[in-house]
Amino acid sequence: MLLIPCPWCGARAQTEFGYGGDASVGRPPDPQQLSREAWLDYVYLRDNPRGPHLEWWYHAAGCRRWFRVRRDTLTHEVLVSAPPGEAIEDGSP
Amino acid sequence: MTSQPFRRLEGGLIDRDRPLTFRFDGSTFTGYAGDTLASALLANGVTLVGRSFKYHRRRGIVAAGVEEPNALATLREGNRQEPNLRATQVELFDGLTASSQNRWPSLDFDVGGINNILSRFLPAGFYYKTFMWPAGAWMFYERFIRAAAGLGKAPLLGDPDYYERRHAHCDVLVVGAGPAGLSAALAAGRSGARVILVDDNAALGGSLRGDTATINEVPALAWVDEVGGTLEALENVRILTRATAVGYYDQNLITVCERVADHLARPDPHQPRQRLWWVRAKRVVLATGAIERPLVFANNDLPGVMLASAVRTYQLQYAVKCGRRAVVFTNNDSAYSCVSALMGGGVPVSAVVDTRASGPGDAARKIVDSSGVECLFGHAVVGALGRQRVTSVEVMALADGGSRVTGRSRVIDCDLLCVSGGWNPTVHLFSQSQGKLRYDEGLTSFVPDASSQAESSAGAARGELGLDACLRGGIEAGAEAARLAGFTPTEDVEAARCDHVDEAPVEALWAVPLPARRHGKRFVDLQNDVTAEDVALADREGYQSVEHLKRYTTLGMGTDQGRTSNVNGLAILAGLRDSDIPSVGTTTFRPPFNPVTLGTITAREVGADLAPLRLSPMHDWHAGVGANFVTVGLWLRTQFYARPGEAMMEAINREVLAVRNAVGMVDVSTLGKIEIQGRDAAEFLERVYINRWTNLQVGRCRYGFMLREDGFILDDGTTTRVADNNFYMTTTTAQAGPVMAHLEYYAQTVWPELHVHLTSVTDQWAGMAIAGPRSREVLAAACEGGDVGDESLPFMGYLESRIAGVPVRLFRMTFSGEMAYEVHTPSDYGIRVWEALMAAGKDFAITPYGTEAMSVLRIEKGHVVGAELDGRTIPADFGFERMQKKDRDFIGKRSLERPALAYGPRKRFVGLISEDGRKIPRGAQLVWNPTAPKPVPMLGHVSSTCYSPNLGNYIALALLEDADGYQGKLLYASSPLTDSHVPVRVGHSVFIDPEGERARG
Ligand SMILES: [Zn+2]
């Protein structure tokens, strides 16, 4: 069970959180302008990297905040977390 | 039979003043407090304790601890019966009842023993090869194999005990309380760090409990007591005994199973039987010791062949002689301390057979020289002889680096053969932590290499077997762990002193060669009956990966997880392949280190406490009138209110008709409720709903659909504009949580620039719906002021009022299709308002109704719920395509434009009426002809079904392809599962009042 650092509540057990998927993909501002392929890519297709991965987590049983975590999918190491909109300064790609 | 013929008269850590009576396989025996089941059986001369897994060979006790492969027993009887317990770990208590396993009908006469005679035909992979062909044969053979194989039987009765889970945090967790672990705990504890020390035995000391060594000039156990006392006096140190660290998970989470009451006949009142600790530690010190390897030679599974360290432990800790005359067979120096223990305890040793031509180091040599025991260096035991147990061993000289045996064989009489093949550090937890192992040539075993988590190993667990090295390594590891956890180790903590023993190195001999033209089973894995020949066969058949070897032969797959067999098996495989052990690799160790009962894992989450229970604010009222309840998610809701003598269907029909003909009231407090506030609240709703919201006036409600980004419906519900920048949303009961998470995701991550705040108020508001042609009159009678007419509260209107002196929110909306209102009030006023409405409705014969009647009413009206909104449907499937905004984006809009969703063909919503008055099966598929050749084309499926007292027939809602084309046609609702195939007539999804006049009044 991971220990997830909520930017507001501190490190808490994984069971308090929900997982929200890839945080490196943003919702396109004007979906109507997108080609069918580009929209399909946004809705369904995600990379599955081996190593650092930026992802959304939701503190469902806590402060109910969404935030981003950079987690290594190979080692499960949680590298850094940050609220939405704040830059993540950890030097990873 | 109470004489304990193999018990020494003095010595040991047992309490001779506390004799204990126990039963094993129906016979009564005596042991002493401090015994394990295994030591007590040995004291009574019981050598046959089980039958082997595959060949049903006789098996005796081999070890004295967690590594025991053979002595698995079923403990206790009735509802406390528990299988597969290692007799070596079961603490004896008075009245203990145990039985052996895997034998039928009895241990001495076992029908399955025929497998031993047939064993030439039961090689590795036998099951795969024989029964997988022809294809169907496995189905036939499986039940016979399952009956004959397997270990203990699971109990069939409910568990009467309870279990606990406990979370703990510490700076340093020390696993193991032997010399290294105690030293580590002392060094870390003195620094002020919060320390948890766990050990699976009942008392501290680990290997020192069966040791004659001297530490700090006192006997080892005196030193253990002194350190234990020091640790107990430290407030920052917690000691857990009878506690096994079983799992090592990410970020230093270690699970520890504490056997709180297993050493008692039954737990004391209010005492849990076991407790699972979830320990999150800053640093972990693994001082888990090492486990002795057996040697592999012919008939090495005969009762009487035991690990040398175990024999020594039984001799010294339990004062038990494991035989009358011993031979010691070793490839390293550690077994020589067994020689001195045996001789000192009155068991003569006929010979020491050492595979090393040069013999042992000086200290070991001194033991044999002073006692005059015959030593055969450069020799090996090629076979154990005897039927019931060992009666003698056959010894030959080794030649060509141990690759063959030579010369005349010599038979030496003995009934106990003590073997030692070297030591394996207990690296299971380290391996679970994802640490990398390294093969150590000097030790001939795997040792921890690079750590992957915040841990370090100390003492024998890292391959430092000497007592002095354990004491020193423990202090260093404990101090370092404390320092890394942010504490300063005190200077006065130094390693305890003991003599250094110079040992000659271990010399690998992985399998003793068979003499020419001789057969005999050389067991690698005793628990799973895997022999050296099985490993060779698997290799010949191409199972060369160690993971394949494991699965094909079942090597190391038993409850002992190959603790004694893994390295021997790997080494034999490496030898066959002419490669070295590191390149063969090792299998992965996974949690749990030791079997854990399901009860311990579940802890208190059983029965009524399996999940939280949510109750409506009006629950006590419902219970008071004898409502029948039903579980809906976590909620307990009223299903129906049966009157005395009334059957369920009668009650439901009465409630439905009351709503259609007069007035009824239902508790809807379980609906999800979300307050949406802020100056961009309306804009936010525009983006998450398919329909328009900015033009909704204050004091009005609107029904809408919310989609996922892939275009499918997430939920439906009604949202009310309470004030300019304040909306009150209701969701379905089931989707309340997901909708909240969905909305918060978009508000916080996608559109953080919007000024909108979301608050879940589900628990803050009680809700009740009054429905039926007389509902307005009831509401008018209850409301202060009383004006709830069309002017002040029109259809889909909202009004704030007071009932019984408390504030209420009134919504004119309908789920039943009748004129209806929802009344919401702060939860604490729920019962007060409910009772006021019941009182006001008395003259109108107001009838409380439950979820069943509510469901019938909405099916009659063709309203959708989760059964229809199943994640595969879009608004157009229900005729709501015109609700969708065309001029602006909303979540899911772009996906609705994908061809499959925009142009169909899609199944659409229809109603069904039973053609022959039979019930329409739930979940049925709609087909033209249920008896057509399979596969029968499936045209659609039934989503909701009920009996309609208003129509006097069974009806259903369904999703059907070419819905327009099938209007008025006859289909079959076909449920092969229940073998019911009911003819149904396809019609409109709204059965009652399709024009919607009733709701508007
Ligand atoms: Zn939080």
Image (cartoon, coloured by chain):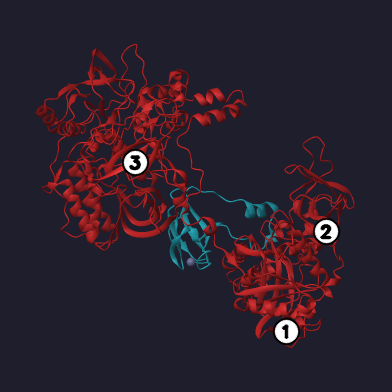
**On screen, residue B922 above or below B126:** below
- Crowding around mark 1 (Cα neighbors within 10 Å: few <14, some 14 to 19, many 20+) is many
Which residue is tagged 1?
B783
Residue B822 location in percent, x, y? 72, 74
Task: Answer with left or right where residue B362 lies relative to residue B119.
Answer: left
Q: Are marks 1 and 3 on the same chain?
A: yes
Q: Of label 2 and label 1, which has the lower sequence position?
A: 1
* Quadrant of the rendering where the C terminus of chain B is positioned: bottom right
* Quadrant of the rendering where the N terminus of chain B is positioned: top left
Q: Of label 1 and label 3, which has the lower sequence position?
A: 3
Res. B22 mark: 3
Which residue is tagged 2?
B989
Mark 2 residue element: loop
Residue at 14 percent across and 40 percent down: it is B500
Look at label 2 and name its amino acid.
Answer: Ser
Question: Quadrant location of residue B84?
Answer: top left
Chain identity for the colour cyan used in the image: A
Query: Which is in the foreground here, disc 2 or disc 1?
Result: 1
Q: Seen from this angle, which residue lies furthest right? A: B968
